Amino acid sequence: MSPKADNPSLQVNLGSLKLKNPVIAASGTFGYGEEYSGIIPLEALGGIVTKGLSLEPRQGNPPPRLAETPAGMLNAIGLENVGLEIFLQEKLPFLRKARCPVLVNIFGSTVEEYAELAKRLSAVDGIAGLEVNISCPNVKAGGAIFAAEPKTVYKVISKIRRATSSFLMVKLSPNVADIGKIALAAEEAGADAVSLINTLTGLAIDVQTRTPVLGNITGGLSGPAIKPIGLRMVWQAAQVVRIPVVGIGGIVTAKDALEYLIAGATAIQVGTAHFIDPRAGLKIIEGISGYLKANGIPNLSSLIGSLKTQGA
């Protein structure tokens, strides 16, 4: 066995963004950061992605909004959020003190809304970049999600890119025919990175009442159940794009994170696991460091994309 690396480097680069480690708190499961600040030191994380933000406040979907499933959960929150103005006034002052990179997750129902959000946030101090959630219905295109086709991905990301020079990460939906083509369209439109996967659409039924468990009928499936799909899609995306890929989906342990890194992810996001254990992200960081030490790997970067597929 190789000699142990006593102090391995966990630093990774997402384009112009330098992270002290590859573990980022995912959007929608970490609030606006402050909710977890009394439990964990936020500066220990590689980064934070805020709860999704729209131009105007949203109330979200009717309850029930959450349903536990085998090895995961369904959520139909409906992108409830405080809106841009309240975010800037009440949430951003705390995030400026987080001492780790903060990405603001944004979404809209039209291309113009995305661009306006990006433009206004690009003029704000204390934000390291944007994560664009394109798993939203385009109201001007009959409700089809922006993420569904390469041409719509290219259109919305191109518009956002023209509106801002900020670091731009595009969060991709798994509910598509060819994730590679979608990732490539985001890159060609000017994305600095892609993150994947968002939740898969699912349904839960109460057999006693024969009604949907969720008030919205369907919801997004997350948690360990989706990890094999997330891994496959991250690996496929990493084969075709030159920009960094950030892995999301069912990451609960350091082993889960390492699988994504080996598959080609430069960094990973921890989501549903934070509902189970608020310290999950910290434990994953410690586990990755322990793995590098035990295997004599001095730099995490050498592990990224090291999957061996010959003869498979």
Image: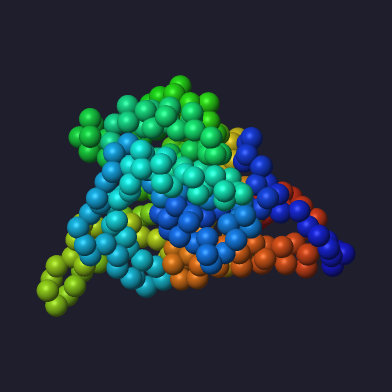
Q: Residue at 36%, 55% (x, y): give it.
A: 200
Q: Is residue 109 left or right of residue 230?
A: left
Q: Position of residue 66 (x, y in %)?
A: 30, 65
x and y percent of residue 54 in the render? 34, 40
Write the residue at 53% across / 31% down.
Answer: 166
Q: Depth check: 221 or 287 in front?
A: 287
Which is more toward the observer, 231 or 298?
Answer: 298
Question: What's the residue at 41%, 50% (across, down)?
Answer: 51
Q: Quadrant of the N terminus?
A: bottom right
Q: Quadrant of residue 86?
A: top left
The answer to whether residue 151 is above or below residue 305 is above
For residue 241, which quarter of the picture? top right
Q: How many marks?
A: 0
Depth check, front residue: 133 or 48: 48
Residue 227 in view: no
Q: Position of residue 294 (x, y in %)?
A: 78, 68
Q: Is residue 288 left or right of residue 154?
A: right
Task: Decide which of 144, 34 is in the foreground and name it.
Answer: 34
- In the picture as drawn, the residue positioned furthest to the top comes out as 162
